Image (cartoon, rainbow, N blue to C red):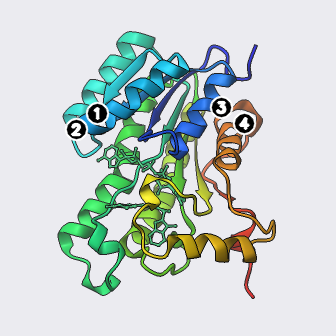
Amino acid sequence: MGRFSGKKVLVLGVANERSIAHSITTELVKEGATVALTYVNEAIEKRVRPIAEELGIKHVYQCDVQNEEHIDKLFAEIKDAWGSLDGMVHSIAFADREDLSRRFVETSRAGFQLALDVSAYSLVTLSKRAEKLMSEGGSIITLTYLGSQRVVKNYNVMGVAKAALEASVRYLAYELGEKGIRVNAVSAGPIKTLAASGIAGFKDMLSVFAEKAPLRRNTSLEDVAKASLFLLGHDASGVTGETMYVDCGFNTIGM
Ligand code: NAD
Ligand code: 0WE
């Protein structure tokens, strides 16, 4: 019997085997959870189907979080398949690539709206649907980054989106708390995933990070998955509205 036996968890944001959501899913499955996965489009579906197969996951649905019809359909399908839900993992972010390389002051209205819509508002609308299925209480987590609180060169509009995401976590935690639903964020240190590929200077960021962080190493996918399972599970029964740093202590350093 695993820690998550009999628990039903929806995971959004697996793109490939290096995704943070993939490491969380792997640990959840190991602990006996029943998991549903989503993919944003056909290209990602080709990656996610074999991953689901390998992990013995039977529920795979399309969900572009910018599409309310996809979200409605996803939760109708989850309701049909499972009837209720215990956990949700939101591991989704997107901004225009140009907005992560030029000056922040150049961010367009459309670029700002895109980043905030995909990376922050999506948690609000997904939580509204999850609330209806979490009749016995539940736990919702999202992934965030230090660029919400501190200036990180080039993170730009994503930093603003993550600040909105972390504030959304607190407001959602306050409202859903009444139903026994907890909402928390995991603030991960930089990890070389698809979302980090093509970011100029990312390799150098990783080596500076490993030098400066108290644990003198980079954050691993396993570090993030273990903390995520803590927040998703009963061990965190008194924790909500929190942003938990899983970054080898990097955020604590001043000089
Ligand atoms: P990833 O590319 O594997 O995951 C990002 C996911 O977002 C992908 O699965 C992608 O398909 C999905 N996505 C993008 N637009 C979408 C849309 N419109 N609808 C639905 N899904 C959409 O990269 P990752 O690093 O695993 O990122 C997951 C989360 O972790 C993100 O929120 C990211 O900001 C956060 N995070 C990453 C790092 C890092 O250094 N990699 C650090 C801290 C936080
Ligand atoms: O949240 C992220 C990455 C989010 C992201 C990445 C991309 C790249 C491809 C959002 N949108 C896009 N759009 C694309 O077209 N991270 C925490 C990883 C990350 O990204 C950075 C970082 C770090 C760390 C960008 C600049 C500086 C640091």
- Mark drawn on residue 237: 4
Label 4 CA crowd tier, 10 Å (few <14, some 14–19, many 20+):
some
**Amino acid under disc 1:** Ile
Confirm or deny contact between disc 1 and disc 2 (CB under 8 A): yes
- Mark drawn on residue 68: 2
State the residue position of label 1.
71
Cα distance in 3D space between marks 3 and 1: 25 Å
Q: Nearer the viewer, residue 246 or 243?
A: 246
Cα distance in 3D space between marks 2 and 4: 31 Å
Mark 2 lies on a secondary structure that is helix
Among numbered discs 2 and 4, the one appearing first in the sequence = 2
**Amino acid under disc 2:** Glu
Quadrant housing the N terminus:
top right
Confirm or deny contact between disc 3 and disc 2 (CB under 8 A): no
Give the percent coordinates (x, y) of residue 23: 59, 39
Label 2 CA crowd tier, 10 Å (few <14, some 14–19, many 20+):
some
Q: Nearer the viewer, residue 237 or 51?
A: 51
Among numbered discs 3 and 2, the one appearing first in the sequence = 3
- At horizontal 75% and vertical 88% (from top left) the residue drawn is 255
Cα distance in 3D space between marks 1 and 2: 5 Å
